[in-house]
Amino acid sequence: MSRPTLVTGGTGTLGRAVVRRLQARGHAVRVLSRRPQSPDQPAHDRVVGDLATGSGIAEAVAGVDTIVHCATTSGRGDVQATRRLTEIARDSEHPPHLIYVSIVGIETVPLPYYRIKLSCEGIVAGAGVPWTILRATQFHDLVARLAAVQERSPVVLAPADVACQPIDVRDVARRLVELVETGPAGRVPELGGPEVLGLAEFARRTLAAEGRAARVVTLPVPGALGRSLRAGRQLTPRHAVGEITFDRFLADRTASTREGPR
């Protein structure tokens, strides 16, 4: 019997998609979570642990073949958590293949979170375990959130002249499971969504899908960050391999909302 794949952040947006894809492909899955599994959640092996403190991590890593590291704290503790995970993986009896999910453009887009992701990449590559790093563009969910966080406003603000190439987490999950199955590969080609459009246009499409009448107003992004974004350093048009468009994501999300919880 093959050893399981551990998914950190397995209850998050990307992690859930990875778990579903792994199970659909017949893989044994172990999910690292800070909370026990509730009776209404899908059945899988869950280990309660906390990357921030190290509690339960050795137990989670023991006996796994691969780790797909999806967990993030939006930067607050990512470096420490990634270092702790890699050290425990390195010191385990059978060091597993560690797959790290990163972001396109982290060397050139001057955002603090991107610098943290770059540091985490360095930790993974230098940890002494078999490793793979996959960089992807921003997820559809994050782009749609631009309008969602301004839901009470009749005007939705969006960056002027800034393009985005969002990708669906299902496309990312499919690629991650391929990497689980093919084994360690170092830095693999980036993964980008199928469309490159302005963030303002994505905001308009989100509003239309939600039936909101708000107006989108664009504002320039100042300084080095604005110059970097306008130059498209967050894009990877040569790797536009994602299949699920933003409009399909919105339609699927609307249908799921109407159906309600299952």
Image: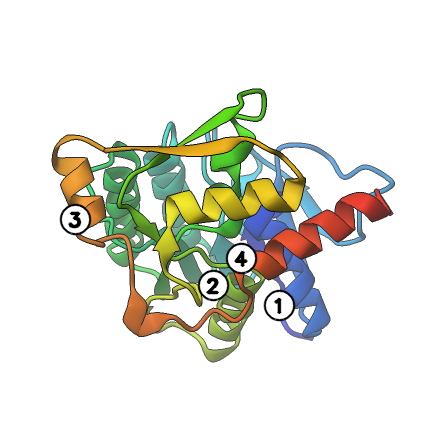
Q: Tell me the tag on residue 212.
A: none
Q: Tell me the tag on residue 108.
A: 3
Indicate whether 187 appears above or below 49.
Answer: below
* Quarter of the image where one finds residue 186: bottom left
Mark 1 touches mark 2? (CB < 8 Å): yes
Residue 253 or residue 109, whichever sits in front? 253
Question: Secondary structure beneath disc 1?
Answer: loop
Which image quarter is the N terminus in? bottom right
The mark lying in front, picked from 3 and 4, is: 4
**Would you name the residue on which mark 1 appears?**
3
C-alpha span from label 4 to label 2: 41 Å
Q: Which residue is drawn at 30% across and 68% down?
A: 237
From this viewpoint, which residue is outermost toward the top? 152
The mark lying in front, picked from 2 and 3, is: 3
Residue 230 or residue 93, whichever sits in front? 230
- What's the residue type where badge 1 is placed? Arg
Sequence-wise, the earlier of marks 1 and 2 is: 1
**Would you name the residue on which mark 4 appears?**
246
Q: In this image, 15 relative to 142: left or right?
A: right
Badge 2, how many Cα within 10 Å: few under 14, some, many 20+? some
The mark lying in front, picked from 1 and 2, is: 1
